[in-house]
Image (cartoon, helix red, strand yellow):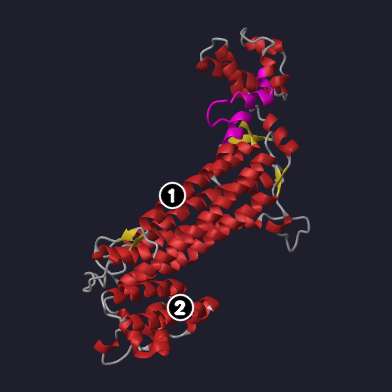
Amino acid sequence: MALWGGRFSTGPDEAFKQFNDSLPFDYQLAEQDIIGSVAWAGALEQVNVLSSDEHKELVSALYELLEEVKADPTAVATSGAEDIHSHVEAALIEKVGDLAKKLHTGRSRNDQVATDFRLWCRDTADHILKAIAQLKAEFVALAERELGTILPGYTHLQRAQPVLFSHWCMAYVEMLERDESRLQDAKARMNYCPLGSGALAGTAYPIDRQALAQGLGFTGATKNSLDGVSDRDFVVELLSCASISMIHLSRMSEDLIFYNSGEAGFIELADNVTSGSSLMPQKKNPDALELIRGKTGRVFGAFSAMMMTLKALPLAYNKDMQEDKEGIFDAMPTWLACIHMAQACIKGVKVKGERTLAAAKGGHANATELADYLVVKGVPFREGHHIVGVLVQLAISEGKTLEELSLDQYKSVSDVFENDVYPVLEIDACIKARQALGGTSIEQVTGAIKAAKKNNR
């Protein structure tokens, strides 16, 4: 029987029931709904709606139901109830009879679902924070293994300046730390309890909402009942966090797909994150990385859909808000799976240091060092930039690197050049020169690795 059936002379037809019912997806809130109900039973006992014996009987039945749900969560989805709240109430009635009907006193499905959903989002955020920490640790471990390996750095997908491969690793650690920080902030903002807000106007019973909130692990209770039942900012924030993080994972994937290509040949991915071709026996495709890149759009879609659902809703609760769940129920596990898969990819990466070094030496990537050399000699940077551009043209015309040009060729462009130019052009010197905070020198990268390990404890 529907929880709202008394007002209606006939029930919904089957098409409307299928259109309206949310149990096929909100069954995922079963544990949170039961935990919230245990807390509400305690609050009702404190205001003498439930006797001590009634409270004990209800709580015992709820915990029994919780164990059943944990044993087979998906069984809930096929019970035929309208939503998870209806299912839990019906299951409780089977266990304790009419006593179960007292549990909904002073409570609405509006504040109930808002509480369940925050609990689910908070639990999910904790799982994702743990996964991000593990991925960060994998990047740091790779940075330690490859410390000293030189990689061409790119802008516009053109070789720009040499960097340490470890510096590349630590760039993604920085991104992941921002992802972590955003998610922690979102979790802190969502951690307020709407239970006791009723349908929209607040409960008529003298419930101690602060104690109720703290008993459920919340920082406190929400301060306005209208906002408490209709706020879904926490869903938008979580999906925003997921979307930004997926941008980072997608960029990482794109880098590694390119590095793994035959054209670059900088890395080899492990067999456990790649697949072959049904036609071409030689192929080893970076499927895990391509799927991360592809699933990014899926998470973006959930974020966009949530904002469109909320953008014109009047206060307080509206049935539109039932659409808040399916997107995030898909996006959060997708995000989590992508983090885990990224970790597997990074763990198994084999870096081909000789290829990365050869590429870093090509493309005249030490041209900036040559301009800096001229600055040290007193040449204004803009003039030095032009001089080096002329020398690059000369080197290209002769099929040489900058360090292969003779001193006479250097002097033909500028008399400032001396034999001391050649040590400046060595690739190790290019790396070592980047000593300022955030640079790619061994010292700076080593410091970044140490800091990241300390922060990730």
Residue at 24% across / 70% down in the picture? 200
Q: Quadrant of residue 357?
A: top right
Residue 63 is tagged as 2
Looking at the image, the residue that sits furthest to the front is 52
Residue at 46% across / 73% down in the picture? 31
Nearest the viewer among 169 and 283 is: 169
Tag 1 residue? 182
Q: Position of residue 189 (x, y in %)?
A: 36, 55
Three-letter code, disc 1: Arg
- Taking 216 as reference, is 6 left or right? left
Looking at the image, the residue that sits furthest to the right is 281
Mark 2: few/some/many CA within 10 Å (<14, 14-19, 20+): some
Q: Judge depth for marks 1 and 2 and give the one in front.
A: 2
Mark 1: few/some/many CA within 10 Å (<14, 14-19, 20+): some
Residue 336 is tagged as none
Residue 43 visible in this rendered orientation of the protein: yes
User: What range of the chain is rendered magenta?
Assistant: 424-448
Residue at 68% across / 47% down in the picture? 260
Where disc 1 sits, the SS reads helix
Q: What is the spatial separation of the Cα atoms under label 1 and label 2, in whole angstroms?
A: 34 Å
- Taking 308 as reference, is 249 left or right? right
Q: Is residue 34 magenta?
A: no
Q: Is residue 360 above or below residue 260?
A: above
